[in-house]
Amino acid sequence: MNHFDYDSSERSFEKVKQSFVKAPKPYFWSAMFGYLVAILSTIVVMTIFNHGQPALLYLVPGCIGAVLLCGFVRREVKEVWEYNETEEMEELYVETKKMFKAD
């Protein structure tokens, strides 16, 4: 869900900051939780076996798994899997270009 009012002409820092702070961030927090669990798993395995392991062995599945689990719970797995920011970045580029040409 997009919480930023793109139709508004006001682009002050405070307005954008308020929109960002108010917006829920379930995928960010699920990725942070997955990261924390994966790091703790890495430390536990390293301590038990007394042998270093590559942290990415646990971090990648932990973060991706947590985000996919969040998408599953929210019934948004298809949107998460097919996410592509190219179109959004192109729209942002055009909008930014218009703003600077107006000055």
Image: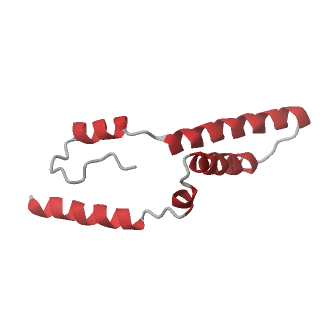
- Image-based side of 100 in relation to 16, left or right: left
Most distant residue in the right direction: 49
Above or below, 56 against 38 in this view is below
Above or below, 46 against 56 in this view is above
The residue at 54%/57% (across/down) is: 80
Q: Position of residue 100 (x, y in %)?
A: 16, 60
Above or below, 98 against 66 in this view is below
- Image-based side of 102 in relation to 88, left or right: left
Most distant residue in the front direction: 75
The C terminus lies in quadrant? bottom left
Q: Looking at this view, is 70 or 21 the one in front?
A: 70
Q: Quadrant of residue 7?
A: bottom left
Q: Looking at this view, is 19 or 72 the one in front?
A: 72
The residue at 18%/50% (across/down) is: 8
Q: Looking at this view, is 34 or 56 the one in front?
A: 34
Q: Position of residue 55 (x, y in %)?
A: 73, 45
The residue at 61%/50% (across/down) is: 72
Q: How many marks?
A: 0
The residue at 13%/64% (across/down) is: 101
Q: Position of residue 73 (x, y in %)?
A: 59, 45
- Image-based side of 68 in relation to 101, left or right: right
Above or below, 90 against 44 in this view is below
Most distant residue in the left direction: 103
Q: Quadrant of residue 41?
A: top right
Figure coloring: secondary structure
